[in-house]
């Protein structure tokens, strides 16, 4: 991707920053619920709406999370690649129109997020540490998978319609 493709207008910066703020606000609001989040669903929707410019939203969201919760390498460093992986997977399936497939993708992503979070453990303590970290978190990954699947199944269509309406309105305004 060239720098020209990532060039953003003032309107883009504003909209993408608001998207990052929305990700952050809902993440903090849902923090009391273990592994229940809307970030996965929203990253997928934002990827379809804003394509490669979603990277601005993802990295600003990660920065906001680090400022608020602290920049601990065990959870913050994975935020730098986990959401980018989800955006990439979403882009691969962008032609899909099935809500069920999006829900399955979101659920599978929730199931394997623990594995992705275990990668820094490899560099800290080797394969044994990474495997132990991942296996210890499987019950949480199952909750994450279920939550992602159900939330995506229920909210995909209404949020996609709302986002589509908002992006059309933004494009038609001077």
Image: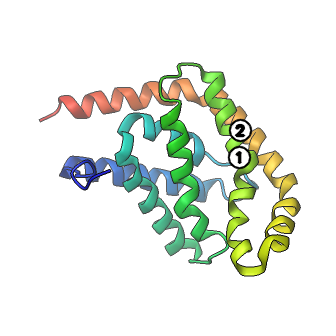
User: Which residue is nearer to you in this view: 56 or 4?
Assistant: 4
Q: Which residue is mark 2?
A: 107
- Residue at mark 2 to residue at mark 1: CA–CA distance: 5 Å
Q: Which residue carries the number 1 mark?
A: 110
Left or right: 8 as drawn, with respect to 23: left
Would you call the spot at circle 1 few (<14 residues within 10 Å), some (14-19), or many (20 or more)? many
Residue occupying the point 82% across, 46% down:
142
Q: Are marks 2 and 1 in contact (CB under 8 Å)?
A: yes
Q: Secondary structure at mark 2?
A: helix
Q: Residue furthest left?
A: 174
Quadrant in which the C terminus appears = top left
- Corner quadrant of residue 82: bottom right
Question: Residue 83 appears at what percent x and percent y?
Answer: 54, 53
- Where is residue 132 shown, x and y percent of the image? 87, 67
**Residue at point 78% right, 39% down?**
146
- The residue that appears at 54% across and 23% down in the rendered structure is 157
Q: Nearer the viewer, residue 14 or 112?
A: 112
Residue 7 visible in the snapshot: yes
Q: Residue 126: x percent and y percent?
A: 78, 76
């Amino acid at each position: 991707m060239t720098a020209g493709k990532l060039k953003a207008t003032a309107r883009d910066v504003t909209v993408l920053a608001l998207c990052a703020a929305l990700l952050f606000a809902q993440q903090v609001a849902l923090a009391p619920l273990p592994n229940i989040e809307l970030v996965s669903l929203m990253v997928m929707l934002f990827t379809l709406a804003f394509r490669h410019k979603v990277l601005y939203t993802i990295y600003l969201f990660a920065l906001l999370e680090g400022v608020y919760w602290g920049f601990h390498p065990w959870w913050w460093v994975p935020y730098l690649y986990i959401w980018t992986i989800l955006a990439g997977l979403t882009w691969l399936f962008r032609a899909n129109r099935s809500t069920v497939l999006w829900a399955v993708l979101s659920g599978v992503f929730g199931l394997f997020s623990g594995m992705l979070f275990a990668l820094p453990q490899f560099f800290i303590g080797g394969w044994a540490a990474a495997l132990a970290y991942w296996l210890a978190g499987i019950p949480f990954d199952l909750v994450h998978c279920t939550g992602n699947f159900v939330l995506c199944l229920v909210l995909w269509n209404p949020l996609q319609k709302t986002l589509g309406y908002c992006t059309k309105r933004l494009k038609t305004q001077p």
